[in-house]
Image (cartoon, grey):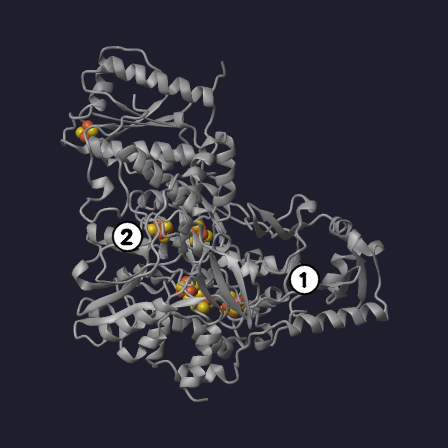
Amino acid sequence: MSSFEPKIVAFLCNWCTYAGADLAGTSRYQYPPNVRVIRVMCSSRINPAFIINALLEGADGVLVSGCHPGECHYTSGNYMARRRLVLMHRMLEYLGIHPDRFRMSWVSASEGAKWAEVVTEVTEAVKVLGPNVIKREQVWMQQSL
Amino acid sequence: MDATKSLRAIAREVLGREDIACLIGYEKGSYGFRAQPCVLTEPDQADRLIFSPLCVHNLTNYLTLEQIGPLSKADIGKGKIAVVVKGCDSRAITVLCAENGIKRENLYVIGVHSPGVVDLKKIERRFPNAVEPAEVSLEGDSFTITCEGETASVPRSELVNAKCLRCKNNVPQGCDVVVEGPEHSMEDDFADIAALEAKPLEERAHMWQEQFSSCIRCYACRNSCPLCYCSECILDKLRPQFVRRSVDFPENLLFHSARAFHLAGRCIECGECERVCPQDIPLMVLNRKLARDVKELFGYEAGADPEQKALFVTFKPDDPNEGIL
Amino acid sequence: METLVLHKDKLKDFLKALGDVRLVAPVTVAGKTQFCEVADIDAVELDLNNYTATTKKVMFPQTETMFAFRSTPDGVKVEEGGPAPKTVVFGIRPCDARSFVTLDPLFTKDFNDPYYMKRRAATVLIGHACAEPTNRCFCPSVSGSPAGTEGLDVLLTDIDDGFHVQVVTDRGKEAISGAKSLLTKATEAHNKQKQAADKASAAKIKRSVNLKKMHEILPKAFGLPEWKETGSKCIGCGICTYNCPTCHCFDIQDEGTPYQGRRLRTWDACMFSEFTMHASGENPRHDRSERLRNRMLHKFSYYPRNLGFISCVGCGRCIELCPVNEDLIQILNTVREVCNE
Ligand code: SF4
Ligand code: SF4
Ligand code: SF4
Ligand code: SF4
Ligand code: SF4
Ligand code: FES
């Protein structure tokens, strides 16, 4: 196994997955420390551009997670998000970005164990892929043609 | 030629009416195979209009601009705008109206059954360096081309724009008046998209990297698109700045995915973006991928039905959960 | 200056003999001709006549880092760019080379623009005369020629067995000095072939525009209603200006992370609505027709009056690439007609 430790940016909805991740912590479930959580009010807050932006800013993988269908705090936000992000997932693959670099999940506030599983699965998959290569080069002084 | 004649007659009548402010159509271009858009206001200008396979532009693009011919912002809305549309163009109006971009009652839509438009790049390669305005018409299965004093006949399939070879329906929808002609409708099997999907991921990554890297980010693809009309575009925004101004592959990737994605379920495949691109970037190969997926995943087709709501403001509880953990 | 001959089989050797310089030449990437830094000399395209790829980026890149900054415990550190790399541009067309001559006064008159000047000083231009001008070319109307040498250091012209090599400047002579052994002196016969080639290509130019007194006519035409009609066809896409070798407008922006970044100069264009947008939200050039009029006036009136050159070299890119057939020849002819001059 390589020693590569990927950075995973996780956008979590405040009402379900964020609480679920909290529960995972208080319940002392073990899961890889690779995720950097960004809390949003609802999965529908995720502009698809955030996903590419996260990759460009150096994430090796991106995870969006919200309430199960039918359980969104705002009734239908996650249905809207699902339409957008399922399509986005397909588009990214078409553009040559491996489908494992962007994942979605439904994790409720009571599913601490599922959260640990999701993080493990996503992290392991990205580990296999190796570092993301479409990053922005944060090199400021450059001569370009 | 007949379409031109009927169009002129319609225009003469329409431009004489009180409630019509102007008419957007096509006229003879300045050289070779170019036609150009024109905005007419008087009945006696009607004879400037033409309609031929050289009328490649999607004129509905003008409907959302801040100036339409002699009408400045303040004058728009005082009278109806008449506009000449082909089958594909008419679907842009359907989308624009459905998302409240324009009001249908402010338009007078003149539809033409287009026999297909030429691919300008192909025809200009075949008949290079034409200076005198050339003429093209469809006779049977061939284009008759009169260029620099000589006449030639070339099979339609060799010079026609690719979009016309898979045109869902050349009969414009929702028109006030229609100039009739041959009708055709084809099934689009998206075979080109499937072929690219079948290639290894690395190969696709490489292809898009090469293509996007050559983009000069003029945003002409956006400006030429009838459905890109946001008054403040995400690409121009500085606070927050989604896309940096650097022109390199990462920024261009972000730009291209945003552009394509904002048109998902809205792009009516008029092909204008790809036609105008000075760098020949195959934008339709991306637009059509989304169109195919939107159809496959959500059973949705842009501009197919005036009653349908925009793709991303609606949902079905049983939309696919594809790939979701 | 000298006239030499290069056999066509020796071209690759000639390029190699240019020595340790950054070579910029047309190559085909993803099916289209681009002006790029050449890594592999075999990739250089010689069938050059019809490219529309921009060459101005060699002196005036689309985005140029002016300086980089970073915040450190000892305050903000600013780093400026180093010298421009020694560059040879190979295969540039005469009109494009001439565009730099028209740009020079802009970047030197009131103020020496260090970014442009350093690239200009470090760059040698080896041109290739157009053997096949296209239907968009009209360089003779703006005092150019498909075999013009203005702005060039060396000019290559296709002749029977290869290239006629005209050394125009001392810089050019020096740049190709490493290739001496590959070049032979041009004979009378070679020079005749070159003259015949120039004549033949000049005869292929079909389009022209009468620019006599245009710089005076245009301001008089400022208020004409015709602008609205012609100019409103424009969709404001900016293709004409981004691809124009003489357009030079730019914007300055910062980008980076909170603690480091750079100041950039990027292309901008008067055809974009944001170009004249004020912070108040007011846009003094709010209609597209006003923007198109500005493009015409800037190129054919303001610029020649202020800086002595028509800001157009007749390359025809704006004509060929405009999606709606805004054609400056047609526009200027109409202006002259309407003004009755
Ligand atoms: S028109 Fe072409 S070059 Fe211009 S921004 Fe669009 S894709 Fe890029
Ligand atoms: S994205 Fe392109 S093909 Fe689709 S509607 Fe816009 S211009 Fe037409
Ligand atoms: S204005 Fe047009 S023809 Fe003149 S130099 Fe610019 S692109 Fe070429
Ligand atoms: S025409 Fe416009 S973009 Fe070009 S140099 Fe003049 S003002 Fe600038
Ligand atoms: S290329 Fe044509 S449409 Fe685009 S900005 Fe220039 S004049 Fe207007
Ligand atoms: S609140 Fe959790 S997905 Fe909407």
Disc 2 versus disc 1: nearer the observer = 2
C325 or B259, which is in the foreground? C325
Q: Residues within 10 Å of mark 1 (few under 14, many from 20)?
A: many
Where is residue C61 drawn, in percent x and y? Answer: 52, 55
Disc on res. C127: 1
Does residue C182 lie above or below A9 as drawn?
Answer: below
Q: Chain of mark 2?
A: B
Please indicate, yes or no, whether residue B190 appears anywhere in the rendered image.
yes
Mark 2 sits on what residue? B91
Where is residue B193 drawn, in percent x and y? Answer: 43, 38
Q: Mark 2: is the Cβ under 8 angstroms from ligand 2?
A: no
Disc on res. C3: none
Please indicate, yes or no, whether residue C114 appears anywhere in the rendered image.
no
Where is residue B134 drawn, in percent x and y? Answer: 49, 69
Q: Residue at x 23, y 11 (%)?
A: A27
B43 or A16, which is in the foreground? B43
Side (left or right) of B286 relative to B148? left
Q: Which quadrant of the view contains residue C199?
A: bottom right
Q: Which quadrant of the view contains residue B191?
A: top left
